[in-house]
Amino acid sequence: MEKFTTLTGIAAPLAVENVDTDMIIPKQFLKTIKRTGLGGGLFYEHRFDEQGKEIEDFVLNRAAYREAKILVTGENFGCGSSREHAPWALLDFGIRCIIAPSFADIFHNNCFKNGILPITLPRDEMDKLMEDAERGANATLTVDLEAQTIMGPDGGSISFEIDPFNKQCLLEGHDDIALTLKRKDKIEAFEADQKHSQPWQWTERMQEGGKQ
């Protein structure tokens, strides 16, 4: 997983509440288990009409926001089904940070597992960032994870809170697999000890493996 330290990029305003995961990535794109290639399906039913033509007034189709790296949006973002394809699609499009008043719990956790930083802010600060994001090509924000700050285009700074464990995982670029591998020596030591103290466990496993 790519580390998240400091991100500077265009912030796209999506002033919509209760954006669910089916809106983020519709069900027809869930056939793959690959994390790449889903950016084209991001917000598909809102970005394209029935003929596959771009809907010009959707925010990510506007010239100023095609390269957006940050999404400023409404309450309860990521609600609905717990599909991990939703953060995959956002990440593949180029979105690495989402700022909202609140997130659905499962989506919030999935973001951290995939290298996306979800930031929760109170309504008054969200209103200011939404105004900043509506500046188009001038809607550049800088998110500093270490300092836990968001720098606006006018130089103003907003602080945000984040769970220390999730923060460290993003800074180090560690997903669940990487976290497990950090303890590889202890895992191998445990296995070696178990092979000595409980050899029947490993004999049974080898027998079961041979039957498959």
Image (cartoon, grey):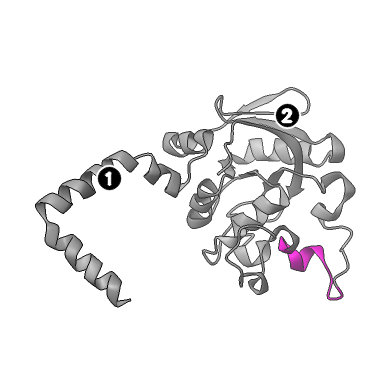
Q: Residue at x 58, y 55 (%)?
A: 76
Q: Nearer the viewer, mark 2 or mark 1?
A: 1
Residue 116 among magenta residues? no
**The residue stretch that appears in magenta:** 41-51
Q: CA distance from mark 2 to mark 1?
A: 48 Å
Q: Which residue is mark 1?
A: 188
Q: Taking 74 as reference, is 31 above or below it? A: below
Element at label 2? loop
Q: Which callout, 2 or 1, points at the residue further toward the start of the chain?
A: 2
Residue 27 is situated, as x and y percent measured from the top left of the image, at: 63, 72
Q: Mark 2: which amino acid?
A: Gly
Farthest-out residue, top: 155
Residue 45 among magenta residues? yes
Q: Which residue is mark 2?
A: 152
In the rendered structure, the answer to whether residue 148 lies left or right of residue 13 reads: left
Farthest-out residue, left: 197
